[in-house]
Image (cartoon, grey):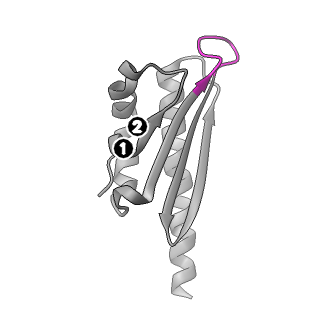
Amino acid sequence: MTTVAQSLRIVPGFAPAEFDHLAALLTPSLEARLTRYTPDQVEMELSVKDRDTDKQRVVLEAWLAQGARTKFVATSTRPDLDAAVLEVRDDLVTQINKHLTKAESRRKR
C-alpha cells in the first residue's frame, strides 16, 4: 500500500517545513485511490509558481506504474494556497478514477 507521504516530493516554492501540512491536505481521498499500488509504483510532485501573487499556480503531477507508466497533471490558480492544493488533489482523484474505469472496461472485453 502506498501512502501520500512516501511518494510525495515538494519542489521549490514550498518550504520543507510545509511537507507534513501539504501531505495531510492531500491524504484523505488521494490515499484511498493509491492503495492498489506499491510504493515503487507511485511518484507525486507538488509545485507552486508565483506564490502569493495573482498569478499563483499550483501543480500536482503523478506517475503511476501498473504495466505502462501513466502521467497525470492537475493544476489550480486559486489564490488561497490550501484551497488550491485541495483542488489539485480532487482533480487528480477524478483523473485516476477515470483512468481505472477505462482500464477495467478494456479488461472486460
- Residue 61, which numbered label? none
Q: Residue at x 59, y 55 (%)?
A: 71
Q: Residue at x 65, y 17 (%)?
A: 50
Q: Main secondary structure of the magenta part?
A: loop
Kind of residue sitting beneath label 2: Leu
Coordinates of residue 80 in the picture (x, y in percent): 54, 17
Mark 1, mark 2: which one is toward the viewer?
1
Q: Residue at x 70, y 17 (%)?
A: 55
Q: Are marks 1 and 2 in contact (CB under 8 Å)?
A: yes
Q: CA distance from mark 1 to mark 2?
A: 7 Å
Q: Is residue 74 left or right of residue 18?
A: right
Residue at image mark 1: 4
Coordinates of residue 99 in the picture (x, y in percent): 56, 63
Pick the residue in front: 88 or 10.
10
Residue at image mark 2: 26
Pick the residue in front: 24 or 16.
16
Image: magenta residue range:
48-56
Kind of residue sitting beneath label 1: Val
Q: Residue at x 50, y 25 (%)?
A: 83
In this figure, what is the number of numbered marks?
Answer: 2
Q: Is residue 54 left or right of residue 37?
A: right
